[in-house]
């Protein structure tokens, strides 16, 4: 499987496209689109979605150089459930990703971006950096490919852009979006490539300063 590339995103215009809540009905189409443009992305998968995925999308993601992150088992707000449920939401998804792909995830995204000290402590214990975002396309609300494309194309160097691959309108926006960003000179990188593998610290939140402004 392709290893993370050694790209210096301090000097190269990098953008990290991230797709949450799947895998779903449109994920394999999205993988085709990314492959066509040689673009890598990051998928924050929901465990129960991955468990019922009949197309083996997780294996394909890894094989094609994408990164998989943990987005919990059933998309619960981790700060609103018991500590033991919170731990199980994360651990069960870690196991499933590893069982399916042979790769242990090193990043997670707490649903709704909702985290606190006990989620952070658990992420650290599981070896997971917490990845939020810097560009929110709000594609779950605005089911309009043109809008999603425009918001995604507003990415800046180093942006982490939030999408949801469970929406058809989002996936349909991707070919034109990739074209827009490639024309602007962007390279599509995974999260680990964006930060360089050594600088993602388990438990820490990225991008730096997230939620403080
Ligand atoms: Ni989500």
Image: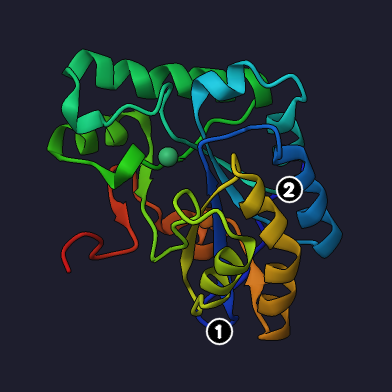
Q: Residue at x 38, y 38 (%)?
A: 128
Q: Return the x and y of residue 139 as percentages of the image width and height.
A: 50, 55
Circles 2 and 1: CB atoms closer than 8 Å: no
The vertical placement of 158 against 98, above or below, is: below
Element type at marker 1? loop
Quadrant of the frame with the C terminus: bottom left
In percent of width and height, residue 25 lies at 70, 32
Q: Residue 34: image x %, image y %?
A: 76, 56
Q: Nearer the viewer, residue 127 or 27?
A: 27
Q: To which quarter of the image does residue 186 belong?
A: bottom right
Q: Quadrant of the N terminus?
A: top right
> Quick one: 79 or 127, which is closer to the camera?
79
Is 91 drawn above or below residue 137 in the view shown? above
Q: Report whether the residue tagged 1 is closer than 8 Å to ligand 1.
A: no
| Picture layout, residue 39 above or below residue 23 | below
Q: Is residue 64 visible?
A: no
Crowd class of label 2 (few under 14; some 14 to 19; many from 20; radius 10 Å): many
Q: Residue at x 32, y 43 (%)?
A: 112
Q: Which residue is mark 1?
A: 11
How far apart marks 2 and 1 lie (CA) works out to 28 Å
Q: Is residue 41 above or below residue 87?
A: below
Within the image, what quadrant is residue 187 found in? bottom right
Q: How many neighbours does mark 1 have within 10 angstroms: few (below 14), some (14-19), or many (20 or more)? A: few
Task: Please indicate whether residue 118 sits to the left or right of residue 143 in the image.
Answer: left
Query: In this rendering, which labeled residue sits more in front, label 2 or label 1?
Result: 2
**Image position, residue 54 (x, y; %):** 74, 19
Q: Which residue is mark 2?
A: 30
Q: Quadrant of residue 183?
A: bottom right
Which sits in the foreground, 64 or 2?
64
Residue at 76 percent of width and 64 percent of height: 175
Q: Secondary structure at mark 2?
A: helix
Side of 192 relative to 208 (left or right): right
């Amino acid at each position: 499987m392709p290893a993370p590339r050694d790209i210096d995103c301090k000097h190269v215009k990098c953008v990290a496209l991230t797709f949450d809540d799947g895998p779903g009905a449109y994920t394999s189409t999205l993988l085709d689109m990314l492959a066509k443009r040689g673009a890598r992305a990051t998928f924050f998968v929901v465990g129960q979605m991955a468990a019922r995925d009949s197309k083996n999308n997780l294996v394909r993601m890894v094989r094609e150089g994408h990164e998989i992150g943990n987005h919990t088992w059933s998309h619960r707000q981790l700060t609103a459930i018991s500590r033991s449920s919170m731990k199980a939401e994360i651990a069960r998804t870690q196991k499933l990703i590893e069982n399916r792909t042979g790769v242990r995830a090193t990043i997670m995204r707490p649903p709704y971006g909702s985290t606190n000290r006990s989620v952070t402590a658990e992420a650290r214990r599981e070896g997971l950096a917490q990845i939020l975002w810097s560009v929110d396309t709000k594609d779950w609300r605005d089911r309009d490919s043109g809008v999603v494309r425009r918001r995604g194309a507003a990415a800046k160097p180093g942006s982490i852009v939030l999408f949801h691959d469970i929406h058809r309108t989002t996936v349909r926006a991707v070919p034109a979006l990739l074209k827009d960003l490639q024309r602007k000179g962007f390279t599509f990188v995974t999260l680990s490539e964006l930060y360089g593998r050594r600088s993602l610290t388990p438990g820490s939140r990225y991008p730096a300063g997230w939620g403080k402004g």
